[in-house]
Amino acid sequence: MVAVAELGSGTGAITRYIAQVDAKQVLLFEQNSRMRQRLEQAYPAFQCHHNALQLREVLDQSGISQLDCIWSGLPFFNFAQSVRTALLEQILLSLKPGGWFKEAEGYGLALPLKIHINH
């Protein structure tokens, strides 16, 4: 089964595409409570969470060992360096070997950043 997380789901622009993929577990992370509530209503089969810094903890609680792909719409350069580092650590700890991290264009990492993990 494909397991995917989206960090900074916002209005669901990427979520709409994720929803078209079959056989998956999807974790959405959105801090804005109003947007998160809309995501919960629009995608009831997906798990919605508040804080992307808790990615690894949420995976453990959900019984998901590792993710196939992580999409990020987070504005990395709006965050302090310590937060950026913590987020990237969570991402690296959460991806399975061969997993993909895809960062939306224009948010401050390589444009677009694609990290392919080979453990």
Image (spheres, rainbow, N blue to C red):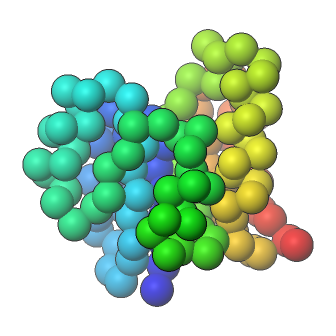
Q: Do we see residue 11 in this rendering?
A: no
Residue at horizontal 62 percent and vertical 56 percent from the top: 56
Residue 47 horizontal side relative to residue 98, left or right: left
Return the x and y of residue 90 as percentages of the image width and height: 69, 48
Residue 26 horizontal side relative to residue 87, left or right: left
Q: In the picture, which quadrant includes the C terminus? A: bottom right
Residue 113 horizontal side relative to residue 7, left or right: right
Depth check, front residue: 51 or 68: 51
Return the x and y of residue 87 as percentages of the image width and height: 68, 38
Residue 109 location, quadrant: top right
Seen as rendered, the residue at the extreme left is 41
Depth check, front residue: 14 or 87: 87
Q: Do we see residue 47 in this rendering?
A: yes
Residue at horizontal 74 percent and vertical 35 percent from the top: 86
Return the x and y of residue 3 as percentages of the image width and height: 49, 72
**Residue 59, placed above or below residue 31:** below
Residue at horizontal 36 percent and vertical 83 percent from the top: 23
